[in-house]
Image (cartoon, helix red, strand yellow):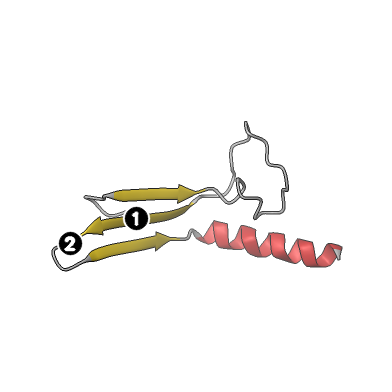
Amino acid sequence: MPDKLQVEVFFDLQTFGILGQSEPSKTAVSQVAPLGFAMHALAAGLEAQFVIPFDALKAVMDASKAKKETK
């Protein structure tokens, strides 16, 4: 993430059940890197960045494929 941020947010995909777990454990540590969002103000406007790690993309694709196979 860039320096001098006003907002920095990370989203754990397992918390939202996106990786196929309908009831994630509150004590479990996610094995997938979180999605990141950062924003900071400039003189001309706002700059926003999204960071989507490749292992997070792969985990979502694998979960989607597994869900289709079980139907």
Whether residue 67 sits left or right of residue 16 in the image: it is right
- Between the residue at mark 1 and the residue at mark 2, the CA separation in whole angstroms equals 13 Å
Q: Residue visible at 67% across and 36% down? A: 25
Secondary element at tag 1: strand
Residue 40 percent across, percent down from the top left: 25, 56
- x, y percent for residue 68: 79, 67
How packed mark 1 is, by other alpha carbons closer than 10 Å (few <14, some 14-19, many 20 or more), is some
Q: Against 59, is 6 above or below?
A: above
Which label sits on residue 42? 2
Q: Position of residue 66 (x, y in %)?
A: 77, 61
In the picture as drawn, the residue positioned furthest to the right comes out as 71
Report the front residue among 6 and 51: 6
Residue 44 point in image, percent of width and height: 16, 68
Left/right placement of residue 20 relative to residue 26 reads right
Question: In the rendered structure, which amino acid carries the disc numbered 1?
Answer: Ala
Q: Residue under circle 1? A: 38
Name the residue at 57% across, 62% down: 57
Residue kind at label 2, given as amino acid type: Leu
